[in-house]
Amino acid sequence: MNLHTTRIELRTSPHVVKGLSVEDIMFNVVLALLPIAAFSIWQYGLSALVLLLTATVTCLLTERLFNYWSGEPNTLSDWSATITGLLLALTLPPSFPLWMTVVAGFVAIALGKVMFGGIGHNVFNPALVGRAFVQAAFPVSISTWAPAYASHRFTEFIPTTLTWPLMTPPNIGPWAKQALDGFTGATPLARWKFEHVATAPYDLLTGAATASSGETSAILILLCGAYLAARRFMDWRIPVAVLGSAALVAFLFQLWNPARFPDPGFVLLSGGLMLGAVFMATDMATSPVTPRGVWVYGALIGIVTVVIRYFGGLTEGVMYAILLGNALAPLIDQYMQPKVFGSAGRKT
Amino acid sequence: MAIPGQKELTYLEEFMEGIWKQNPVFVMVLGMCPTLAVSVSAVNSLSMGLATAFVLVCSTLLVSLIRKLVPKEVRIATYIVIIATFVTVVDYLIQAISLALYEALGAFIQLIVVNCIILGRAEAHASKNPPFRTVVNALGMGIGFSIGLFALGSVREILGAGKLFGIPLFGPDFQPWVVMVLPPGGFFVLGAWLLLFNWLSSRKGGLERVEPVEGHVHG
């Protein structure tokens, strides 16, 4: 034993470090996403399966490609590209053509993540960057919906899935009619907005409504989120703030004009709000780190979502709300710095 | 350029300056307003590039010819008047050749007056060099600008409409990428080209690279 080891070390905090790595956290998020992915395969069959696989494989390959180009070590094993791929697939409609999924996956990793310097450096949630790009590029395909629980979902692809690259997808109508007579292809949010019909909460809870592949089952998403929150892999305050503020705003609007605005339950359960609040807004790299900032960030996302849904041209606003929240996260952090213990109460 | 102590460029080097080493779009990143706004299709971007090149060559030639007559205090105003004259010529010329093109390019033809490539060339090159050398340099710059615009416009037209020069490339079933003909598409494609250009130049080592002020430390 030499002299150096017996000296008293002077260090700044943290003094106690938990043996938890990025890989552990990311792997657990993947685990939490798997039940939701499995449920979407159960609902939409083969097409959902290949959609999930395509998105994930594209994200992994893109990450590997950029690792290779930049001469940096392989970062596939930290599971973050897998999460991006899974999340991206879960936000896309199950009938989304595979070649467009490849575009979305490439943009998600290349533009959303690698360009900023890889894991931990990205400003925006990569999966949402990918989705925002394909929503701007292919507005028709991203709002074409397939019926859930079609009887032939495990034997046939949804016809749009296997569109040739660069080509326009075929009409989904005949396939959907075969599955469900009177299928309109509108999501609960679109039906509320354009036809003023609110879908029954039971259908929203169990996933019998038309939607993106992973956003239908609120119960499952909440359970998986609870697992992550219980193991402290996720900040529980963010989903609580997002859902709470969305519900509060929806409640106030309904109080003001019950004939025009739906009840808060519908707002919480429809569309991608649940998935976004639990799995996307909570992305560690793109959300604030200050305790008060987290509440502000969550509330902002919830309020913007409801405002876009009620007054915007789009039927769903979660994606843009979260991207906006991501962009404002550093600013929120700056203004919500906790007071340093022992510092003076007021600046003079 | 005639900086003391620096070897004078050959005419070929002078010409290649604008095409590669100091490409207005990819290296100097000048004239971004027409670049992003007009490059929706190959035809639009090429004609915009040629119009700019014409104004560039003519006005730098004139500036170079009268470079010893113009007092220093009023030189910028003189350049602007000269440039505006040739822009007016181009404006009427395009209107006469193709009214459809004229309407597609819109105000951006008139805005060539304030294109910083032209004023920059007049100030930095034409006012200090003899006419022939200036014309060679301006020709390179004009062609370099046209290449840059065409690089953007062709990609945006191919992805945004499935066509090149209005000729369909992929048949009637092509799915257009709507975003490519919108303003964000311009930024995406420009970013991708800049990336490619920087990557090529860092491999060749041929370009004057602008070093970042603060080096990023990889952990």
Image (spheres, rainbow, N blue to C red):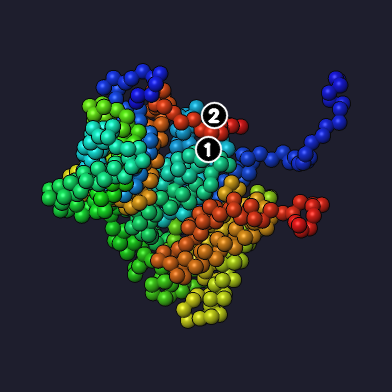
The quarter of the image holding the C terminus of chain A is bottom right
Quickly name the residue at label 1.
A117
* Chain letter belonging to callout 2: A
Q: Give the side of residue A158 with respect to residue A188, left or right.
A: left
Separation of residues labelled 1 and 2 (CA atoms): 13 Å
Residues at discs 1 and 2 in contact (Cβ within 8 Å): no
Front-most of residues A12 and A179: A12
Residue occupying image coordinates x 66% and y 56%:
A336
- Examine the rendered structure and indicate whether residue B1 appears above or below residue A20: above
Amino acid of disc 2: Pro
Quickly name the residue at label 2.
A73
The image shows residue B194 at horizontal and vertical percentages of 39, 36
Residue occupying image coordinates x 59% and y 53%:
A331
Give the image quarter of residue A190.
bottom left
Q: Kindly identify which numbered label has been placed on residue B48.
A: none
The image shows residue A271 at horizontal and vertical percentages of 48, 63
- The answer, for residue A287, to whether it is visible in the render is no
Local crowd size for mark 2, using a 10 Å CA cut-off: few (<14), some (14–19), many (≥20): few
